[in-house]
Amino acid sequence: MDCGPKRGRGLMFVGVVIIALGVILLLNQFGLLPRGIVLHFWPSLFIVVGIIKLFAGNNVGERVVGSVLIGVGAVWQTNALGLTHITWGQAWPLFIILVGVLFLLHSVSDQGDPKYKFTSDPNAGSFYIFGGGERQVNAKDFRGSKMFAVFGGYEVDLTHAEMEGAEAYVEANAVFGGGEIRIPTNWKVVVQGVGIFGGYNDKTHYIQTDPSAPVKTLYVRGVAVFGGIEVKN
């Protein structure tokens, strides 16, 4: 778990938001707020949950979900107060733009993060826009990679790769697209990806071929927006 200063400040902010929400609900219970005011502000719950995920999320998937919830709550709340009259047909392209911006910011902020350093094999990472492709990774020092598809797809074969340590990280993202990741049977998979009108599917079968060897674990993270990621052997 990341317990650095940035995450500590995020959790502190989340705590303040939760306390403020509790105070509002308590005042309403004692009749100290105008009657029915809470009913006008219930969409703000989406914003509160979104803030929690945005500041306390462990990966890009949770932060993207948090940002989308904040956007949905903001549109719903301003409509409920009569400040705006935005339809969902008008709003959903803005959410797609927001997701794209978050991906860009995440890509820049993760530069230098040891979890996502590329291996010696240049085929470890994939990036496709309006297209797709297949890659086979034969690296003997696999530690992690990033995969991204927008209106496209990718297939990455890791069955001939060897993990350098006990853990490796793959960030597999797709927006209006999908991806397939094939891994060795002696790698254990932990899927932590988040789907927004999409999802992640783990079809692997873990087999420990050498009981004396340390367990090799691959963490699959990211977000799938109107798309899907499948991990299999």
Image (spheres, rainbow, N blue to C red):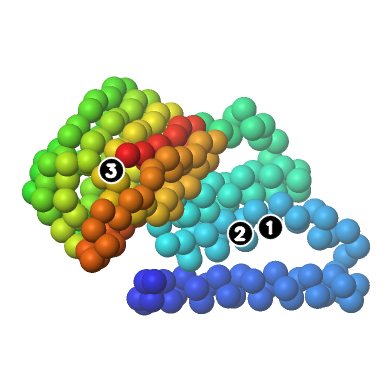
Q: Is residue 117 left or right of residue 192?
A: left
Q: Secondary structure at mark 3?
A: loop
Q: Secondary structure at mark 1?
A: helix
Residue 164 visible to an observer of this rendering: yes
**Residue at left offset 68%, top offset 56%:** 44
Q: Residue furthest left?
A: 120
Residue 110 visible to an observer of this rendering: no
Mark 2 highlights which residue?
49
Image coords of residue 81 (percent x, y): 76, 48
Q: Earlier in the sequence, mark 3 or mark 2?
A: 2
**Residue at left offset 33%, top offset 51%:** 207
Q: Quadrant of the C terminus?
A: top left
**Residue at left offset 59%, top offset 75%:** 16
Q: Earlier in the sequence, mark 3 or mark 1?
A: 1
The disc at residue 45 is 1
The local crowd at label 2, few if under 14, some if 14 to 19, many if 20 or more residues have their Cα within 10 Å, is some
- For residue 117, above or below residue 86: below
The local crowd at label 3, few if under 14, some if 14 to 19, many if 20 or more residues have their Cα within 10 Å, is many
Q: Secondary structure at mark 2?
A: helix
Residue type pointed to by label 3: Ile
**Residue at left offset 26%, top offset 53%:** 209
The disc at residue 183 is 3
Do the CB atoms of the residues marked 2 and 1 lie less than 8 Å apart? Answer: yes
Location of residue 84 by image quarter: top right
Which mark is nearer the camera, 3 or 2?
Answer: 3
The disc at residue 150 is none
Foreground residue among 41 and 141: 141
Image coords of residue 167 (percent x, y): 26, 61
Which mark is nearer the camera, 3 or 1?
Answer: 3
Q: CA distance from mark 3 to mark 1?
A: 40 Å
Image coords of residue 218 (percent x, y): 31, 54
Q: CA distance from mark 3 to mark 2?
A: 35 Å
